[in-house]
Amino acid sequence: MPVQGLGPYDDTNIFARILRGEIPCRKVFENDHALAFHDINPQAPTHVLVIPKGRYVSAADFAALASDAEIAGLMRAAGHVARMLGLDAPGWRMLTNMGEHAGQEVPHFHLHVFAGAPLGPMLARG
Ligand code: 5GP
């Protein structure tokens, strides 16, 4: 069971369907515990999503319940994506939205990797 906030894991969510191969994605990288693919509606010149293969609703759920190997696998996948795409020198941003106030839309935990241009302030003001 997830820890709080978003309810039980929904196996029909769009990222679960991508993981099962029911919906295509533009894959960037995959390891035993994570899949990385381009966001369908990019918010920066490079916008990659890095998701665990396990059934985790949110960052809170993943942090509390994922194994050390799953946590390492996800973080190493994000780092690998950045290196593969040559993002380290110009720089990149990693972000996750958790729950209602953050505007999380897809209830399968994901990291956003943004890059390719100056990304502006961390949060929109006002
Ligand atoms: P959230 O708002 O939950 O943090 O981010 C969800 C992200 O998933 C959004 O940036 C959205 O564009 C992306 N997304 C939603 N549906 C799909 C899809 O079917 N394929 C891909 N590649 N990205 C999707």
Image (tube, rainbow, N blue to C red):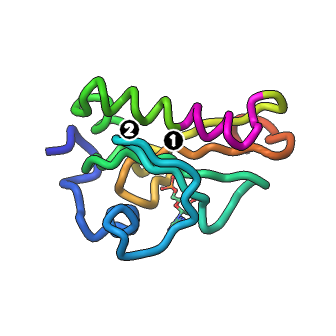
* 112 horizontally vs 75: left or right: right
- Which residue lies at the image location 37% right of the left edge and 70% below the top edge? 21
Look at the numbered disc 1 and give the secondary structure of its residue: loop
For disc 1, the marked residue is: 96
Circle 2 residues within 10 Å: few <14, some 14–19, many ≥20: some
Q: Which residues are magenta?
A: 78-88
* 103 horizontally vs 89: left or right: left
- In the picture shown, does residue 72 fall above or below 4? above
The reply to whether the residue tagged 1 has its Cβ within 8 angstroms of ligand 1 is yes
Cα separation between marks 1 and 2: 7 Å
- Which residue lies at the image location 42% right of the left edge and 51% below the top edge? 100
**Of 56 and 28, the residue lying toward us:** 28
Q: Is residue 87 magenta?
A: yes
- Which residue lies at the image location 18% right of the left edge and 54% below the top edge? 8
* 96 horizontally vs 47: left or right: left
Q: Earlier in the sequence, mark 1 or mark 2?
A: 2
Q: Are marks 1 and 2 in contact (CB under 8 Å)?
A: yes
